[in-house]
Image: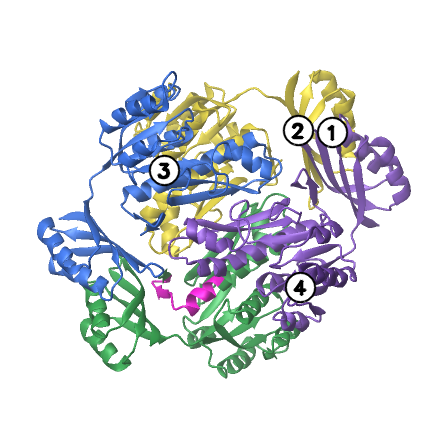
Chain colours: A purple, B yellow, C blue, D green
Amino acid sequence: METKTLLTDCPDAMGLISKITNICYKHQLNIVHNNEFVDHAHDQFFMRTELEGVFNDETFLFDLDRALPKGSHRRLISSERKRIVIMVTKEAHCLGDILVKAFDGTLNVEIAAVVGNYDVLADLVEKFGIPYHHISHEGLSREEHEAKMIATVEQYSPDYVVLAKYMRILTPDFVARFANQIINIHHSFLPAFIGAKPYHQAFERGVKIIGATAHFVTNDLDEGPIITQNVIHVDHNFSAADMARSGRDVEKSALSKALGLVLDDRVFVYQNRTVIL
Amino acid sequence: METKTLLTDCPDAMGLISKITNICYKHQLNIVHNNEFVDHAHDQFFMRTELEGVFNDETFLFDLDRALPKGSHRRLISSERKRIVIMVTKEAHCLGDILVKAFDGTLNVEIAAVVGNYDVLADLVEKFGIPYHHISHEGLSREEHEAKMIATVEQYSPDYVVLAKYMRILTPDFVARFANQIINIHHSFLPAFIGAKPYHQAFERGVKIIGATAHFVTNDLDEGPIITQNVIHVDHNFSAADMARSGRDVEKSALSKALGLVLDDRVFVYQNRTVIL
Amino acid sequence: METKTLLTDCPDAMGLISKITNICYKHQLNIVHNNEFVDHAHDQFFMRTELEGVFNDETFLFDLDRALPKGSHRRLISSERKRIVIMVTKEAHCLGDILVKAFDGTLNVEIAAVVGNYDVLADLVEKFGIPYHHISHEGLSREEHEAKMIATVEQYSPDYVVLAKYMRILTPDFVARFANQIINIHHSFLPAFIGAKPYHQAFERGVKIIGATAHFVTNDLDEGPIITQNVIHVDHNFSAADMARSGRDVEKSALSKALGLVLDDRVFVYQNRTVIL
Amino acid sequence: METKTLLTDCPDAMGLISKITNICYKHQLNIVHNNEFVDHAHDQFFMRTELEGVFNDETFLFDLDRALPKGSHRRLISSERKRIVIMVTKEAHCLGDILVKAFDGTLNVEIAAVVGNYDVLADLVEKFGIPYHHISHEGLSREEHEAKMIATVEQYSPDYVVLAKYMRILTPDFVARFANQIINIHHSFLPAFIGAKPYHQAFERGVKIIGATAHFVTNDLDEGPIITQNVIHVDHNFSAADMARSGRDVEKSALSKALGLVLDDRVFVYQNRTVIL
């Protein structure tokens, strides 16, 4: 007996649930959890099906492909632990949260390596027996620096790259190599305060709520598909520095929740948004 | 073309989704929304299916009944507006919220009447052109008073009875007549502070969070199946009276959200808990 | 014995609390609540002091003025009920919430009148025995329409003007006549989604949180000092219309909370932000 | 120039703020932050004053003691980093959060040691260069085990003892030795679900909110003064195990927030409740 997750994403049509679940039934696969969603604005169907049984992937997918309409995507994903590489700059809180959650099993993930453009976090990472690569950007062009970063990340063949407060903007080349695989945490409730120093922007605007947004990275800065958002209330007592300090817990919980959803194969990306089933 | 909602609740078995959706497909009913849940602890299956099409209720239900296992419950519910009777004592906030939400269509409901054991809210209710019945409990035994309440409520044949801060305990007879049809708002996050004066209890305990719980009424005081809960943060500045004042918005939003879920046929009651699909 | 609130706002200096509370003590005024705040970025001092006793306003303020540094503002406010005029367009939820809260005393306020550019809410307002002025903008220039609005509002000499989903932009002339007296509710967590159709903007961006912002109105659209903000989580199931429907409770609670703070004389406006004591 | 915090706690009387701030002024101490609270139910006055200047503790406190009424408590606390000992059983999340927050300076604290009745967390603690004491309870009476725990904790003379999911009940002797110095995290929103297995209790009751409570430990199980509470929404999809998993972030943020408040000398304990200034 194995557990696998089937993700289906296709143009909507009458009878889709029936067709897909019939095939599961025919293959004697038990449906442990099933969630579907139809985007009626775009007539697009999404279904996530957790299955249990003895799988013959080839015949199962063959049957599915015959049943599904044109333009369908389906993936059958085994329940193996996924591998990530984390990219950081200087801040420890998001990184530390993921390290502890991987350590105690809250996140079912293998942290293959951490790569940073400073070395201040090397010590923390190495405490956990994980390799830390310090790739300084000093004296390098953006392209040269990224070429080194990419080479380092790629040697681990990660399923996902997690930007845990990595404070540099990625080039289109980097983004293209890991399409819908790079998860970033931005320290504002997007689309408010795009770009640099969002807590300073928030302070200047006098907001009463600050937040954080975990999203997939695209080439448009802070414009990628949002996975999770989290906020806390602030008041006039908060300086920009206080907001940054209080925001740490907000950032880390938004990021690790998003990462958990992605690792559980719950996140579809569609029309620059996410469907989470 | 009509829209109806099918609620299915039965012992879990392999192929249930497939069987039910096959029948929908066979009857050329389009699935607008579908949500299911399996309680693996009790092996119980729940499904809510919003259907669109031309219905032949008889043949559709006949096909379903043949397909479903023993011990199944299924209901096919038309999208007609439901009718409620509201019971109150003296406080206006929950009542007022439902009145305004029925007035502007936020809640798709007909308020047939309001019944109160005081007359202080008669004026507010009559502003909205809704009959108010003042049935004082003074000089009456509990049984006599309830007999009058029941007679008044029953003449409207309500789908649901909403206790919008009705501050008296119902007898088993009353509860039995409207099983799983009476929705109450209790002004604490149950099971904390069961019974009388929960804000005073909360103040005495020095809590930093207060809340409200909307639940179906059973014969065990404040022990019925919970539909929604809502909380706010408080601090040492709050007296019990301040908590009560601030709690009003928490109570009314928990109650009207619960009522909205019930009116949309989203709430299954099972094992003294709710499954909300 | 009377209760009054002293609001002090001046450049920071050593000994201010001592000086002000000495004067209160000298006048035998008991301090019921006292809150102060120093904006260290701008060296500005704020204090709100609730006083109880027998007041000689003239000598008390004379003493204060001698003690406070240059550039100070101080106001001694009696606890009389304040008067508001509400401006609306077509939506009932924010208006209805304030009507019910004034009715049951949750808000200590006199609603002098409601003015709307449509007549759909006249019926609701008149249920509460409050005058409704329908001033249609049709066939009028913006200036002509506003001249009528201003004339109508001003006849009530309101302490505050509450825009309860009034969907037109005010001219600088209107804003100037009621500086820091106009409270608006905007249906987004500003500064996200400034301007028209914020829920559509939110839906398009695929956010996981929607919100509302109550703020004082200035001449910069949606840029005025923020008083309160409130949010709820949403997901892919929410269409723009669903967001708008769910947002109603968020809007009304942000607005009525802001109004309550303003009516309690808790809100200082400073540097386009609010200090709430 | 130094910074110190003055905490004053005394029966309420007219002129207290004036008297205390006069003395600060006389000593040329600048008030950086000042917060006060009067519990009108018990006529008790609380004030927290952050002061900056050149301190002569002796004469300053002498002046204060002459000015304050009988039954006053006042403490002048230097801004030195405080020292804690953490007690644990098997769960890593609360401990890990405090370790990372001490590492990156979010919490200004010295973790002197960690003491656990199992050894599973030794490895994590030692990564951070902090001594771990494994004191198994096996084969020991409760008194014998606690005697060993106390001896180990006391050798570090901690300012506070933090129970980061320490799953054993302390004896009155232990509690007495560290009165108002022991901070516990309980995994429910107290007073709901006192005692063992709160997530199982929550699951059985079918609640829609789960929470965590950080509180000072007294001899009444889970009845001590509450410092912080935190909650999240759950639904029918959550098993008791899911609640426990999701609850980890709630627990750790409630605990570390409470710890931060205590370390900043913001928490007064009074009448089995906390006043947080």
Task: Evaluate if marks 3 and 2 touch, with contact meaning CB atoms under 8 Å apart.
Answer: no
Classify 10 Å Cα crowding around label 4: few (below 14), some (14-19), many (20 and above): some
Task: Evaluate if marks 2 and 1 touch, with contact meaning CB atoms under 8 Å apart.
Answer: yes
Disc 4: which residue? A104
Classify 10 Å Cα crowding around label 2: few (below 14), some (14-19), many (20 and above): few
- Please give the range of residues in magenta: D257-273
| Helix, strand or loop under label 1 | loop
Label 1 to label 4: alpha-carbon separation: 41 Å
Q: Of C49 and C99, which appears nearest the observer?
A: C49
Q: Of C268 and B51, which appears nearest the observer?
A: C268
User: Residue B122 occupies which quadrant of the picture?
Assistant: top left
Task: Evaluate if marks 1 and 4 touch, with contact meaning CB atoms under 8 Å apart.
Answer: no
Disc 1: which residue? A12
| Discs 1/4, front | 1
Q: Which mark is residue A40?
A: 2
| Helix, strand or loop under label 4 | loop
Disc on the earlier residue, 1 or 4: 1
User: Where residue D216 appears, x then y in whole percent?
Assistant: 44, 66
